[in-house]
Amino acid sequence: MAFDLPPPPVAAASVSAALTTTKVEVSSDYHGQKIVLYGAVFNSTNRPADVVVVVRGPDQSVRIARKVQVAGLWLNSRPVVFQGAPGFYTVASSRPLNEIADFGTLRRLAIGVDHLAFNTPADGAVETRFGVKDLVVSRLGSDYLDYRRAVVRIKHAAGLYDQNERGVTYVDKGLFRAEINLPTSAPIGHYQAEIHLFQEGREVQVRQRALEVRKVGIERIIYLFAHERPWAYGFLAVFLAIASGYGASVIFRRS
Amino acid sequence: MDVYLPIAEVSVNAPLLIGLGMVVGFISGLFGIGGGFLMAPVLVFMGIAPAVAVASQANHVVASSASSVFAYGKKRAVDFRMGAVLAAGGAVGSLVGVEIFRILRLLGQGDLVVSLSYLIFLGVIGGLMLIESLGALLRRRRGEPPEAFKDRRPAWLYGLPLKMKFPRSRLYISIIPPVLIGVFVGILSAVMGVGGGFVLVPAMVYLLRMPAGVVVGTSLFQIIITTSLVTILQAGRNQTVDLMLATLLLFGGVIGAQLGARASVRFRAEELRVVLAVIVLLVGLQMGLGVFVTPADPFVLAPGMGG
C-alpha cells in the first residue's frame, strides 16, 4: 500500500544518529567516560547542511557568590541561585555556531553556553518593559551577566560545560562523528543528546537520543542505602568504625 | 589505583587515602586528638566536597580514636566519668553547632567562618601551647626545676555547685566547667568538622588541671562519643557520609593510631606538645590566611542546597 506512505519529501535534508553507548555504568573504577556519537546526513538538496550536537545532563541548581573585600577580608556576598542550569552541557558543531544560525535562533533553541536558559527565579520578576513581554528583571541588574558568565566559567573549568566548534567531524561523505567526554564529576541521571540539522540558518530537523548515567554494583548499594535508610546507614558506619578500632587494638596487642 | 566514591562522586587515589588515614591516625594516637583539623583541608584539596569530607572524616575519627582508647583503657589512662560529662555537653553543643552551620551555609558564609575559626582557634591554641611547652623544655635543658606545679587549683573550680567525684582524675569539682567545655567543643566540632581534641586537651590540662596521664585517653573517649553522634546526624540528616571514603581512611587510621599510641611513651610530654603546637599553628595559618589573599576568581560556588 504505497499510497499510505507519506510522499517522499522533495529535495529535503535529514539526519540520523546513534550513540555508541547509551548506558554509562559508574562503578568503583569509574573515571569518566568518552562517548562517541555517529550520524549521517542525507542531503538531497544543493544547500549545505550543518549538524549541531547538544548533550544535556540533569538539571542542578547552582548557588554562586561573589567575593568582596571588607576590611581586608574576602567575604562572600549573598549567594544567588540559578535554577534550570544543566549539570552537564556540551555543544559540538563543525563550524562556529554564529555562522550556522543567528542569535535569535540559537537563543530560542538554547544552543550554546551563552544561550542556556537558566535564570534566578528567586530574585527575578517577570515584567513587561518597553513593550517587551516576559522580560526577566533580576535583583542583580547589570551584574546578572557577570554572575551568569561566572557559572559557565566555573562549570567549564570542571569539564562540565563545553562548546567545541570543531567537535563534529566528518569521517566520510555525510557520515559524521562527535565525541562527548563525561568527566567523573558529571552528575548521575538521564542525559539527552539532541542532533540538530541546520540549513541556511534554519533548523530543519532535530533528533533525540537518550543516555543514562547510573551507579552500579557496590557504588549503587552504598548510595541507595545512604539515601533510603540514612539513620541505619549512620549507625552502621559508627559500628564499623568502633569495631575496626577495637580489632586493630586487639591485633596490635598480640603482636 | 583510583576508586570512585559513591557519595562524594569523585574518583580518588585509594593508596593515598589509606596513607593519609595512617598519618592522621598516627598523630591522633600520639597526641590524643582526633586529627580532623589536619584531614579536612587535605580531603577538600583532593576535590571532595567539604560537607562530605567533614562528615566522612568524623567516622574516621571514631575509628582511630576507638583504636587508641582501647590501648589507653588497658593502661587505666581514661577517666570515663569525666569523658561522659564532657560528652554530654558535647552532644548539646554539636546539635546547636549543626544548626548554626546550616544557617551560615545558607547565607554563603560557611567558608569564611570555617577559615576564621581555623585561624583564630588553631592560631591561639597553637601559639599558647608553643610558648608554654617551649618554656618547659628550656627550663628542663637548663637543669632548672620545673615551674612550681600549680597544684592549687583555681578556686572557682570548687566554688560552683553540682560537685562530682572523678576518682581517676583525683578531682572533686563541679560538673559545670566540664559541661561548658563540652558544649563549646561540640559547637566547634560541628562548625569546623573536627573532633575538638586540640581544644579539649589544653582545656583539661590548664583549666580542669587533670593529671597528664589521663588527659589523652579521656579526650579520645569524649571524641568518640561526639564524632559518633556527628556521623549519625550527618548521615541521617544530610546523607553526606561516604562509607567508601570512611573505610579507606579508617583502614589506615586504626593502624596509624596504634603505632602513634605506642610511640607516645618514647617521647617527653613537653616535646610532644611543642610538635603538636607547631602542627596546629601551621594548619591554622594555612587555612586562615586564605581569607586575606585576593581570590583568583571573584566568584565561588556556594555549597548547600543543590549545586
Image: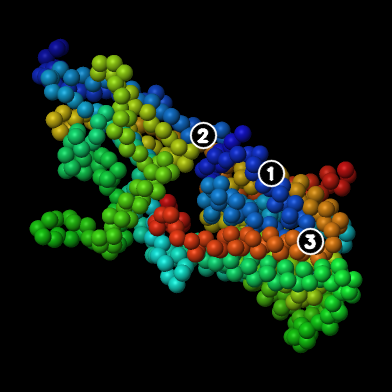
Which amino acid does the dot numbered 3 rest on? Answer: Leu
Note whether B211 is above or below A226 in the view shown: below
Q: Nearer the viewer, residue A83 or B95?
A: A83
Residue at disc 3, secondary structure: helix
The label shown at residue B135 is: none
Mark 2 or 1: in front is 1
Note whether A109 is above or below B44 in the view shown: above
Q: Are marks 3 and 2 on the same chain?
A: no
Q: Are marks 1 and 3 on the same chain?
A: yes
The label shown at residue B272 is: 3
Which amino acid does the dot numbered 1 rest on? Answer: Gly
Determine the chain carrying the residue at label 1: B
Which amino acid does the dot numbered 2 rest on? Answer: His
Marks 3 and 2 sit apart, C-alpha to C-alpha, by 42 Å
- Asked whether the beta carbons under mark 1 and mark 3 sit within 8 Å of each other, the answer is no
Q: In the rendered image, is residue A206 in sight?
A: yes
Give the residue displayed 43% in from the left and 29% down from the top. Answer: A34
Q: Quadrant of the C terminus of chain A?
A: top right
Left or right for B216, reference A87: right
Q: Which residue is mark 1?
A: B19
Give the residue displayed 31% in from the left and 24% down from the top. Answer: A169
Residue B111 placement (x, y as % from top left): 50, 61
Q: Which residue is mark 2?
A: A31
